[in-house]
Each structure stands twice: as C-alpha cells, then as structure tokens.
Image (tube, helix red, strand yellow):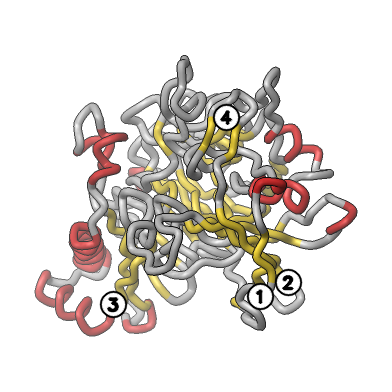
Amino acid sequence: MTKHHLPATPDTVHWGYFSKTLAPVLTLKSGDRAVIESITHHANDDYARMIEGDRAAEEIFLWTKDQKTLRRRGAGATDGPFTYGAGEGLGVHLLTGPVAVEGAEPGDIIEVRVIDTWPRPSANPAYAGRFFGSNPAANWGFQYKDLIEGPAPREVVTIYELDMGEAVVKALYSYLWTPQIDPDGITHPTIDYPGVRVDHDTIDKKEGILSGIKVPARLHFGTMGLAPAEADFVSTIPPNYTGGNMDDWRIAKGARMYYPVAVPGGLFSCGDAHATQGDSELSGTAVEISLTGEFEFILHKKVELGGTILEGLTHPLLENDEVWSVYGFSVANYLSELGPDHQSEILKRGSLDSAMRDAFRKLRRFLMTTQKLSEDEAISLMSVAADFAVTQVVDANWGVTGSIRKSIFPAR
C-alpha cells in the first residue's frame, strides 16, 4: 500500500462542478491510501477565522478587481456578461481532486473507505489552533418561504466553533445577510454565488445565541463521488448516480462507500465538509467546515461483482460495521432522464415522494439480489426492519436513505 498526500491548492481544487474533462491531480493504484485536504466554500463568511493566515485558503479565495484565482465557480457559462459570476454558481462546492484509480473503467465499482477525518485549524494567530464553521440559513433552504418572524424572507449566517476536546460544536454569533458587492462590481442581495467575501462592516453580529447548547460533532464530507459521463461540467448541487452532494452524516469515519464508475479512472473528488449535520440539512447547509480525510481506494472490476453485495449496483451504496444503506433521489439519474436541460430541470423536481419511491426500489433490488429474497420477503422485511431517513431537502434532487442492519441476516 502506498500512502499519498493531496493538499488543497489552486492547482488541486475545482469549484462547483464535477467534470470528466479534468486531468487527474493524483493517480493511484487499488489498495492505496490518500490524505486529502478540503477547504469549505463558506470560509469567506468569516474571513478572519477561516481564511486569514492560511496561505492555501488565501490563494484559493483570492479575488480582486484585477485577479480571481478560481474564475469558474459552477457548471454554468464562463463568458460574460454574468448574472452572478463565471460558472454562474450553478454548483457551489469547493472540491479537491480529481483522483484517478488505475484500471477503473465504466461498469466497475470504486470503493472509498473513510479511514479518518480531522478539522483544519485556523491559521490566524488570534484564533490559532481553533476550528470554525458556518451555517447559513439560505434562500435554497426548506424554511425560506415559511418564516413567522420578520424580516421575511431572510438569510441568516451562524458561525460555530468545533471543540475537538468535547467533540461538540457551539454557536458563536449570527448575522443577517446584507447585500454584498463582489470585486467585479456585481451585487449579491442573497447568497447566490460561492466565495463572495462578507464585509463584516456591513453586518450586525448577534452574540449569545443558542447559549449553553452543545451539539455533538459528526465530522463527514457532504460531497464525495465520481465524475458522471453525461456532460462535460456537472453542478455539484444535485446528487446523482455517481455520488456527489448526498449530505449524509453517516458517510463518516468507518464508512465504506461504493460508487459506479462512469468514466475511465473514475475521477473521485471530495469537499463540502461538515462539523455536524442533522437529517434534512433543513436550512440549506450544515456546519460547513474545512476538513482533511484519509481514504483508501479499492477497485472492484465488473467481472468480479457477481455474487457480491455489488452485483447490479448502479448507484451509491454505503456499508459500515452495522448497516448497508442505499440512496434514493427525487430523480434517480436526472442527467439521463431529464433531457438536454437536465441541470436546470432538476431544480424544479425536489420531491420526497419520488425520493422515497427510489430508495424503496433500490433497497428491494439489493435485498432480492444479494440476500436472495423474494419480492414479498423483501417488502415485509423492509417494513419491519429497514430504516428510511431524509438525508436532505435542499439540493434540488432530494434524498432519502434506506438502511438495513446486517445483524438480522444469518451468516451465508
């Protein structure tokens, strides 16, 4: 086994999209491990705590009227004039990668084992060694048009601190989003484009919020997956059949994720890391934080999948010591099902009904294929033993996960 290190730098990150056109920044063999750094796309919500003094973060987020290190942010247009900016924010997550696995071909499965995760400390001497994250209650959140206090609608950013000693997160302060003007002169009345630096002279901080409340940490990557084949640039916002923005806090240390390979090498990227999150990610975000992960990559060739839990797998699958979990989406494969305008059409299709239906069908297939159950047996077992949970209702292609405990099956 070879262990690699992939730092987050302007040359190893891409912002807001998966792409089969990207050259790998790291190529490894099946069985190798990689330590991969990520930086949260929400770091500019509090520049002093999450960027200042961190050379890599400063370079990645650099944006002046004369220079913008990462110009494309999203899968949209890169030729102006722009509504929001290059890439148009059609995809927002800052991802590190892609990583290619030697010999991976369409039809194969890449297994990604999450060996460990740890947060990236603030490099500002004023906050040295501390860990911070941001939780915007944003315009894409489930609550945005259902508020009972004024002003409504509104977006509120809450800054949290992660205490690794107690393994909890605690709120520090919040502020109401005010229109921000980016270095290109575009005004952002809402949180509509990633990486816009919030001018703290334009906001009023509300201190003492959520006093005494400590939320258990759940370190995980909200976005992990492979490059799809259907388009050159695919927004990071909706999850899809090769993974992506699934926002499941269970994809954490000890998890083994299986992804169908759509393009040669697979092209794995990760980011959108969270200090903690609840099922639903209701406000639009979790506690967005910069995180480093250690991963092990295992290639499973198509000819070897028969008779294993990977037989017939066409979507992401999670395995840990306790459960197997499948992921249902509002549209199972929106890239192929919604026609040429799939990236705009999926924004209209969020539905828990169809996500639950997709999760049911995927878990039924898994039980019938891997456990050799009849359809009636599988349905009965799902009703009495499976747990279905809402992973997120904010990423256009909403998610439901269906989990079945390993312990209920006899050794076979």
Q: Which numbered circle lies on residue 386?
A: 3
Name the side, left or right, on which 41 lies relative to 412: right
Is residue 263 in view from this perspective?
yes
Sort mark 2 into few (<14), some (14-19) or many (20+) by Cα contacts within 10 Å.
some
Q: Amino acid at mark 4?
A: Pro
Mark 3 against mark 1, which lies toward the viewer?
1
Q: Residue 200's x, y, as percent?
A: 70, 48
Whether residue 219 sits left or right of residue 75 in the image: it is right
Q: Which residue is denoted by mark 1 in the rendering? A: 168
Sequence-earlier tag: 3 or 1: 1
* Among numbered discs 4 and 1, the one appearing first in the sequence: 4
As helix, strand or loop, the secondary structure at mark 4 comes to: loop
Q: Nearer the viewer, mark 4 or mark 2?
A: 2
Camera-nearest residue between 30 and 112: 112
Q: Nearer the viewer, residue 406 or 356?
A: 356
Residue found at the far right of this picture? 125
Label 2, on which residue? 163
User: Where does label 4 land, which residue?
Assistant: 24
Residue 323 position (above or below residue 74): below
Q: Residue at horizontal 62%, vertical 62%?
A: 174
Cα–Cα gap, marks 2 and 1: 5 Å
Query: Counting residues from the N terminus, which is met first, the one under dot 3 or under dot 4?
Result: 4
Q: Residues within 10 Å of mark 3 (few under 14, many from 20)?
A: some
Foreground of the two, 32 or 87: 87
Coordinates of residue 245 in the picture (x, y in percent): 44, 50
**Upstream in the sequence, badge 2 or badge 3?**
2
Q: Amino acid at mark 3?
A: Ala
The answer to whether marks 2 and 1 mark residues whose Cβ atoms lie closer than 8 Å is: yes
For badge 1, the amino acid type reads: Val
Residue at left 72%, top 79%? Answer: 166
Q: CA distance from mark 2 to mark 3?
A: 34 Å
